[in-house]
Amino acid sequence: MVTDTAGAGFDLRRLAVPAYGPSLLFGLAEGAILPVVTLTALDLEASVPVAALMVMLTYASSLICNVPASVITHRTGERKAIVGAAVLGALSGVICWGATQLWHLVVGVLVFGAAASVFMLARQKYLTEAVPVAYRARALSTLGGVMRVGVFAGPFLGAAAISQWGLRSAYLICAVALALAGVLGASLPDLEVTEAVAHAKVTVRDVLHDHARVFATVGLGVVLISAVRASRQAVIPLWAEHLGLSAGHASIVYGIAGGVDMLVFYPAGKVMDVRGRRWVTVPSMVVMGLSLLAIPLTSGAVSLTVVSCILGFGNGIGSGMVMTLGADYSPDIGRAQFLGIWRELSDLGAVGGPALLSGVTAAVALGPAIAATGVVGLVAAGVLWKYVPARPGART
């Protein structure tokens, strides 16, 4: 229970099943299918470069759909948006399962990305309004952490299904998980909407204009955060391969780092609520930046595992910080549109980070490319130090 005045009487546990259950299941669904999308494309006679692009389609679809997702959520409400997105995601799993041509798979992946965009925006907006500000960072850090648990467990569940029923069964796991997410999402209590919010006529352009300074300052930090985080997912397996480690060893290193990542999300949220957002956002980026700078200095499995765990710790303590900052700056009127733009900035970074890693690798080498990503992390820390308030609840 929250003991301060602002959050007195609020118990986050009452939202555990209806709010966090769908997020866990969505993470399971995503984790189950992402490892097999490339393999399915190859099975449908796609070339290796085309197959490698398939996962990127999910992020591209999300990038395109973030702003429309904000409009949908504003018009239908959070609960209906969450349920609709879950149903759409389940449909995408069925499409991928039944794909007989490459374009069928492309459609399924694009639909999944669109569903993810609506789902993630609606769940963030719901918790932003349902949870008192004094408990906001803990609520959103837990949301991010629960999603990570699902994404971590999803590949194992998918692998178990594949061992019994073949490659395509992972998509059925996705469809079933999202159908259950829709059922749980339907149990969310509707939020009270004030007369002013209900009848407000606000456009994405209005929100972009009114909050341009926030998007250009803290929003820049969000772009850099997402670039570092997205690059991190590729850095560990790429450097493991560079060191001559087997795919199995690389997976173990990645899995151990992911386990560390999942252990620290709630304490980090509490620190953000009690001490302020800067106490977590800046250290997260400093730890990740320095860890990425250190990875090219590792020479074997043990040193890579140690540095990867520190990298995972840095990422883990930042769980939910992008959502928390978005919630802090979002206005009561136009919140859905604001969060749609916020997610757009995040996805731009998620696409740009791996592109930077790839470009520098092609131009120079993998080591300098990883180091460049580390520098981006330190720059992100500087931006966040300058623009994120030191005190809880304050705004720049």
Image: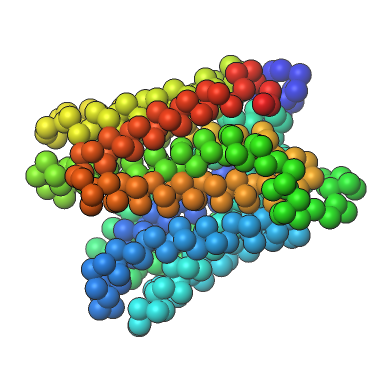
Q: Residue furthest bottom?
A: 100
Picture quarter containing residue 316? top left
Picture quarter containing residue 212? top right
**Can residue 161 be seen in the rendering of this structure?**
no
- How many dots with numbers? 0
Q: Is residue 239 left or right of residue 352?
A: left
Q: Residue at x 43, y 56 (%)?
A: 30
389 vs 131, nearest the viewer: 389
Q: Is residue 99 above or below residue 195?
A: below
237 vs 359, nearest the viewer: 359
Residue 28 lies, in percent from the top left, at 43, 53
155 vs 227, nearest the viewer: 227
Residue 357 lies, in percent from the top left, at 31, 46
Residue 363 lies, in percent from the top left, at 23, 49
Quarter that holds the C terminus:
top right
Q: Is residue 387 left or right of residue 333?
A: left
Q: Is residue 134 above or below residue 357?
A: above
Q: Residue at x 34, y 68 (%)?
A: 169
Q: Residue furthest left?
A: 244
